[in-house]
Image (tube, grey):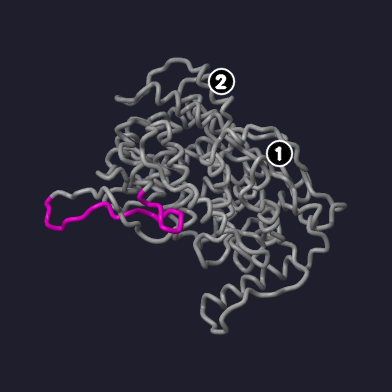
Amino acid sequence: MQAYLSTFKATPTDGRDTQTSLAQYETETAISDLLIVLNNPSDVRLNRAIHAQWAHTSLVQGLPSRYTSQDASQPWLIYWASQALTCLGIRLEDSTKQHTIDTILANQHPDGGFGGGPGQIPHLLPTYASVCTLAIVGRPGEKGGWDQINRQKCYEFFMRMKQPDGSFIVNKDAEVDVRGTYCLLVVATLLDILTPELVEGTSEFLRSCQTYEGGFASSSHPYYSAESDKPQVLSEVRPTLGEAHGGYTSCAVASWMLLQPYQRPEDPKFNVKKLVRWATAMQGLPIEGGGFRGRSNKLVDGCYSWWIGGLEPLLLDLLGPGNQEAETEVPTHVTEETDSESAWSDCDYGPAALFDKTSLQRFTLVSSQVSTGGLRDKPGKSADPYHTNYNLAGYSTAQHRVYRSLVAEKKLLDSWQSSEGIIKGSDEQLRKATWARICAWQEDEGAHFYLGGEQNRVNATHPLFNLMISHTRAMANYFYQQKGT
């Protein structure tokens, strides 16, 4: 794929304008206008300082009044800004960290989990954002945030959300959503409160959410028989609720991988080949800048650089983790001297690459950056914390090759120090396998690729959590009572 354009030629239509075709044309025009003016395909820069200032201001001083509608998403706004700053390589002041810790802990509910703000009911999604924020800024000890998490109550909250078919409602009397399943599994994994009881049937639920396209929907139809007083769980086939979507797919695939220590070899699997085909088809054409769309026939959007582009390490692992151990030598950046298309478009990203990472990096740098700070959905849109975080996360995945090392995993398993889980019914062998598996993800230091040079580098992110690998390991080591590596 070539995302560098010399002329504009819109995607052909059948000559009948619709809202969809007009929006597609406007998007192609806006992106192409930015790409055509490039004198050199590598002449793009990450405006690190401006984005860092924008994210820091959002975190410390707050957001404009239009964000009042996001009152129930306070932990998310904090997480997005904190993780964006970490991805950019910005270290927060100790005072800012402590203020962030105190703010997050104020959202913890006495019955377990975290709400979207002080006094709000617990919800799986802000619980994820809260714990991930504490992984970034927190620490063990008094006022450090980690020891102040009520893990037992959090587990009890999770069990109250569990449904007979293995799914989870996101909060009391609410809907089932695979995003809630992911948020729960991330928190349970990091805090060492994952148990067989908690995840019974969850793999089957996730598998039932895969659509005919290959991606995943938000949920599936679990029940039938309106005459029965007791709901009956469908075994086969459970129709999906909705179409394949990038956000749901990312959450479903990451959830599946977090559950792998709890799965048996004979358990049914989802169709990985269909998933790969769908995910790769979501990357836009050159005229769309090589960004990703979230659904078939929709517009490209910078957040899907993570929700779909960030899937690549997970997809490669599902296809076979052994093929990722090979050491490779790849170009680390494209300079002004390599201005011919053949010099930069055929870069080898390592043992395998499912997406065009050059185009994805360029899409972020050219189409997603806002000159006043922050990153956006697409040209014509404003910057916001959500798109800033997920643009940078996808951009990071396009720069770095992060993989699950089987060698590292074996060393971690061998180094395990026997410990007892805090939750009754937890299995030490499963806890051991879970800890080793999430901590075995590492960066291949020889396979990074920075379009525009080292100055455009951002930190590598863990593909299962969207946290720095170091933050993931630190929290996991603490709660699993391990020294780590």
**Which residue corresponds to the image point at 57% horizontal and 78% vertical from the top-left?**
22
Q: Nearer the viewer, residue 383 or 397?
A: 397
Residue 381 in view of the camera: yes
Mark 2 and 1 residues: CB-CB less than 8 Å, in contact?
no
Q: Is residue 224 highlighted in magenta? A: yes
Q: 458 left or right of 194?
A: right
Count of marks overlaid on the render: 2
Q: Earlier in the sequence, mark 2 or mark 1?
A: 2
Q: Nearer the viewer, residue 352 or 403?
A: 352
**Which residue corresponds to the image point at 78% horizontal and 67% vertical from the top-left?**
37
Please rate how many residues cluster around mark 2, counting C-alpha atoms within 10 Å: few if below 14, some from 14 to 19, many from 20: some
Q: Nearer the viewer, residue 74 or 232?
A: 232
Q: Quadrant of residue 186?
A: top left
Mark 2 to mark 1 CA distance (whole Å)? 23 Å
Q: 100 left or right of 209?
A: right
Pointer 2 residue: 411
Q: 396 left or right of 422?
A: right
User: Which residue sits furthest bottom?
Assistant: 16
Q: Is residue 222 highlighted in magenta? A: yes
Residue 308's tag is none
Residue 447's tag is 1
Q: Quadrant of residue 403?
A: top right
Helix, strand or loop at label 1? It is loop
The amino acid on which the numbered mark 2 sits, given as a three-letter code, is: Lys
Please rate how many residues cluster around mark 1, counting C-alpha atoms within 10 Å: few if below 14, some from 14 to 19, many from 20: many
Residue 160 rendering spot, x and y as whole percentages? 27, 41
- Which quadrant of the rendered structure holds the N terminus? bottom right
Per the rendered image, the range of residues in magenta is 208-229
